[in-house]
Image (tube, grey):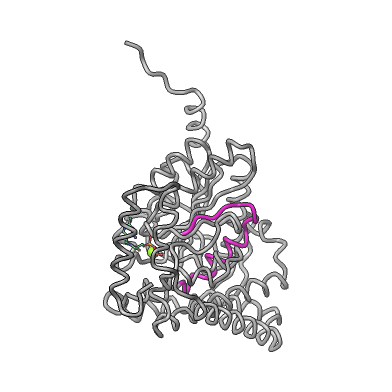
Amino acid sequence: MSTIQPETSLSNHLHDERAIPTEPMVDGTSVPPGEASADFLQLLTPDGHRTPNADYDPWVADVDVASLVRLYEDHVVVRRIDTEAMHLQRQGQLGLWAPLLGQEAAQIGSARSLRSDDFVFSSYRENAVAYCRGVDFTDLMRVWRGNSHSGWDPYEINMAIPSVIIGTQALHATGYAMGCQFDGGDQVAIAYFGDGATSQGDISEAMVFAARFQAPVVFFCQNNQWAISEPVERQARIAIANRAPGFGIPSIRVDGNDVLAVMAVTRRAIERARTGGGPTFIEAVTYRMGPHTTSDDPTRYRNQEELDEWSVKDPIKRLEAHLSSMDALTDEVRAEVQAKADSVAAEVRAGTLGLTDPDGLSIFDHVLSSESSWLERQKSQYSAYLDMFEGGAR
Ligand SMILES: Cc1ncc(C[n+]2csc(CCOP(=O)(O)OP(=O)(O)O)c2C)c(N)n1
Ligand SMILES: [Mg+2]
């Protein structure tokens, strides 16, 4: 009987990975999963004060006042889009909306760290990431209005359509990253998911493969404290970032409401992946200020005190305080940013209201690459069903 020998390259990898220290901000197993004020990287305090950090300052050294104003504009615009979408849903124009309120910095700081040829795999809440990738929001609204199964051509903006099935996108990202690696390119994939998603097997499986192959992928977990009505304490007994080193993946916890800190850690993780250093797991500690979706009523499971506590850490207030401290938030800047936000929101509204219903039978298009008798049969049965409605239901 032959003995199975461990593959040499695999054991080398494992050896190497054990040698990779976990980033200094993740320390031991003592951090409670919901703890937001300790053991994470922060470069901007909630009152807008810039805290120096020798390790991470170089990663954002080029972010000057003009760049900060652009980041501020991103924040205000995506929050405005989010508000508009909530209103559109309440007015019966969208079937559902998953607000990102409170998570702007985590999404903008990370998305603005990517190259346009890097590839994004997201969940349903990454609307600010989609904005940064250049998604046409009418395309996004098409999905939430029930007009289409998917919103855009992923290859035009290098962002896959959102995954509603929790955690699957981490596998897609890892597979894509392995493909980049095999092709010899230097593109990086990033997977966005939530705290709750880390309880899914798909996330663990993705980390196993990413670590084994040292795939150029960044796992970006937004710990927004809740998975619908389940608090993060019920998902994990230790900080979520602390799970990754067990897979051989370095990880870091960052203040997810601090756009500068998010940018610093993401740039570093991207650079590591791009230069053959393998995956990184980022836990961005943030808070979902709104409901899970428009179908949810969070007052049934969380209290106002918690909301008040987090509203002090709001990412936009923080940037405003920081810009003001440098006299960079003039009335003119505010007015320009507001005007841009209002015009984007008006475009989103007009685009949404202008969407026309697709032909009911188009649901059968693209199911299979070739004709099939059973699909044709279903199509004709559905056609007969639609004909039963007066005025046509198509
Ligand atoms: C595989 C799977 N299981 C359950 C659900 C139902 N579901 C939708 S969102 C959600 C919670 C996800 O929480 P989290 O990962 O923290 O992301 P968040 O919504 O907070 O951004 C669940 C359980 C689903 N969509 N897919
Ligand atoms: Mg969550």
* Residue 94, percent from left and from top: 42, 77
Instruction: Tell me which residue sits at (31%, 63%) in the image.
Output: 382
Of the pair 129 and 63, the residue shown nearer to us: 129
Q: Is residue 287 visible?
A: no
Residue 101 is inside the magenta segment: yes
Q: Nearer the viewer, residue 394 or 273?
A: 394
Residue 85 vertical position relative to residue 128 in the rendered view, above or below: below
Image: 257 above or below 2: below
Foreground: 123 or 362? 362
Picture quadrant where residue 6 is located: top left
Q: Residue at x 52, y 48 (%)?
A: 280
Left/right placement of residue 27 relative to residue 259 reads left
Q: Nearer the viewer, residue 162 or 63?
A: 162
Quadrant hosting ligand 1:
bottom left
Residue at figure coordinates x 58%, y 64% from the top left: 109
Q: Position of residue 118 (x, y in %)?
A: 61, 52
Residue at 54% from the left image edge and 72% from the top image edge: 138
Q: Residue 215's x, y, as percent?
A: 53, 41
Residue 249 percent location from the top left of the image: 48, 43
Quadrant in the rendering for residue 74: bottom right
Q: Is residue 323 visible?
A: yes
Magenta region: which residues? 100-122
| Left or right position of 130 against 293 | right
Q: Give the side of residue 224 with respect to residue 181, left or right.
A: left
